[in-house]
Amino acid sequence: MKNSDLTVVTTTHEDEAKARALAAAVVRERLAACAQVYPVQSVYWWDGEVRDGAEWRIDFKTRAGLFDRLAAFVAAQHEYETPELIAVPVTAGSTAYLGWVAAETAG
């Protein structure tokens, strides 16, 4: 299936337990059908210097139309001053999987 209205929304968290709790809360609210949590090492510019630290990345599988609600929910729950919130469109995928994501999200 091509040209889906699905997206992958990414954020990060510094704590694994909090990342998993955020992932579960978003899925429970039906703002995403699935969330994957995994460790990453981030190098970034913050407060005038280069930082390097372990983080936990969360990828949410959702519908593009839910981005604003998902972003507001994550921002309200997140401890970062400026949490990463980016959406990457899903341009193609299996019909069954894309249908499952659409069916399991609010809307």
Image: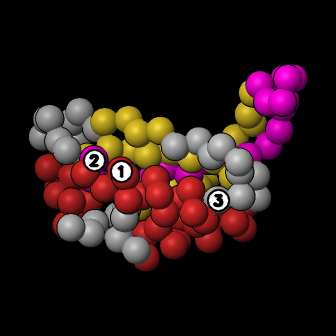
- Residue 93: x and y in percent read 22, 41
Magenta extent? 45-64
Relative to 11, say whether 78 is above or below: below
Marks 2 and 3 sit apart, C-alpha to C-alpha, by: 21 Å
Does the magenta portion include 57? yes
Q: Is residue 104 visible?
A: no
Q: Tell me if 43 is positioned left or right of 1 in this view.
A: right
Neighbour class for label 2 at 10 Å: few (<14), some, many (≥20)?
some
Relative to 103, say whether 75 is above or below: above
- Report which residue position mark 2 lands on: 64
Between 39 and 24, the one lying in front of the other is 24
Q: Is residue 49 visible?
A: yes
- Report which residue position mark 1 lands on: 67
In terms of secondary structure, what is the magenta stretch mainly?
strand
Between 30 and 20, the one lying in front of the other is 30
The amino acid type of the residue labelled 3 equals His
Does the magenta portion include 17? no
- Residue 30: x and y in percent read 35, 71
Disc with the residue nearer the chain's start (2 vs 3): 2
Q: Tell me if 99 is positioned left or right of 58 in this view.
A: left
The quadrant in which residue 75 appears is bottom right
Please tell me whether mark 1 sits on a helix, a strand or a loop: helix
Please tell me whether mark 2 sits on a helix, a strand or a loop: helix
Disc with the residue nearer the chain's start (3 vs 1): 1
Marks 3 and 1 sit apart, C-alpha to C-alpha, by: 16 Å
Q: In the image, what residue occupies the spot 28% across and 66% down?
A: 105
The amino acid type of the residue labelled 2 equals Ala
The amino acid type of the residue labelled 1 equals Phe
Question: Disc number at residue 78?
Answer: 3
